[in-house]
Image (tube, helix red, strand yellow):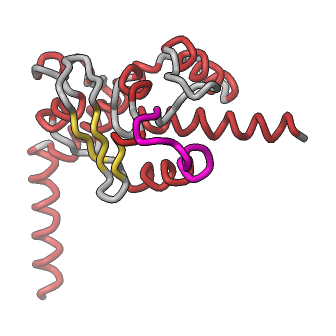
């Protein structure tokens, strides 16, 4: 029984760490450096003090993630000091890069996933942000990139990604839709 409780505890901790990375697009190195005081759940804001370009980055925390983090903190970090890490190792010290990578690898393996790169989560976030209607300039800011050229590398669209948007915004298809709408309105007035 103790083993299954320990497994569930580890699973929740891993999920919390990983869920922080995917819906915000932050780098794994930034996840490791988040301290309790960097997270403001009253206004769903995360202040990244440790970034690749050494500039403070302020991110919005999606409401669903904010709720998951509240649960995680209530269960595991409720008594943590503001300067302690949000996701520490077992000795309440900073999680190492290797430990985070290993944890993510185990997390993926248990789910039958062969891709185990944390950095791929960042690319996945960027691509899905654009596919869901986000703009590349906002994405550049969210990812903390210094130029659009870097952001472009994150969002390499393939044929399957483009097809739905191509059809939705294609001028010929839109003319056809408007024409069909006008015909149905004319018929309904008669």
In front of the other: 79 or 152? 79
In the rendered image, the vertical position of residue 157 relative to residue 137, given as above or below: above
Residue 135 counted in the magenta span: no
- The total of numbered circles placed on residues is 0
Image quadrant containing the C terminus? bottom left
In front of the other: 78 or 156? 78
Q: Residue furthest bottom?
A: 190
Residue 36: x %, y % from top left: 42, 41
Q: Residue furthest right?
A: 1
Q: Please indicate whether residue 149 sits to the left or right of residue 57 in the image.
A: left
Residue 43: x %, y % from top left: 29, 57
Residue 170: x %, y % from top left: 14, 42
Q: Give the residue at x 90% y 41%.
A: 1
Q: Give the residue at x 26% y 22%.
A: 51
Residue 47: x %, y % from top left: 27, 38
Q: Give the residue at x 13% y 52%.
A: 174
In front of the other: 42 or 63? 42
In front of the other: 117 or 40? 40
Q: Please indicate whether residue 8 sits to the left or right of residue 77 in the image.
A: right
In the rendered image, the vertical position of residue 88 relative to residue 171, given as above or below: above
Residue 83 counted in the magenta span: yes
Instruction: Write down the quadrant of residue 76 in the picture.
Output: top right
Q: Give the residue at x 63% y 40%.
A: 12
In the rendered image, the vertical position of residue 77 relative to residue 147, given as above or below: below
Chain part drawn in magenta: 73-84
In the rendered image, the vertical position of residue 47 relative to residue 176, given as above or below: above
């Amino acid at each position: 029984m103790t083993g299954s409780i320990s497994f569930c505890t580890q699973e929740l901790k891993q999920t919390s760490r990983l869920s922080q990375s995917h819906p915000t697009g932050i780098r794994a190195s930034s996840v490791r450096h988040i301290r309790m005081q960097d997270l403001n759940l009253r206004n769903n804001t995360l202040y990244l003090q440790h970034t690749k370009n050494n500039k403070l980055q302020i991110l919005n925390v999606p409401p669903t993630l904010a709720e998951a983090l509240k649960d995680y903190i209530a269960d595991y970090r409720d008594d943590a000091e503001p300067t302690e890490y949000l996701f520490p190792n077992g000795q309440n010290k900073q999680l190492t890069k290797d430990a985070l990578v290993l944890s993510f690898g185990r997390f993926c393996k248990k789910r039958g996933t062969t891709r185990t790169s944390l950095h791929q989560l960042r690319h996945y976030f960027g691509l899905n942000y654009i596919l869901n209607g986000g703009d590349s300039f906002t994405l550049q800011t969210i990812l903390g990139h210094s130029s659009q050229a870097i952001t472009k590398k994150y969002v390499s669209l393939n044929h399957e990604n483009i097809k739905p948007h191509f059809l939705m915004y294609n001028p010929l298809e839109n003319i056809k839709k408007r024409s069909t709408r006008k015909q149905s309105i004319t018929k309904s007035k008669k």
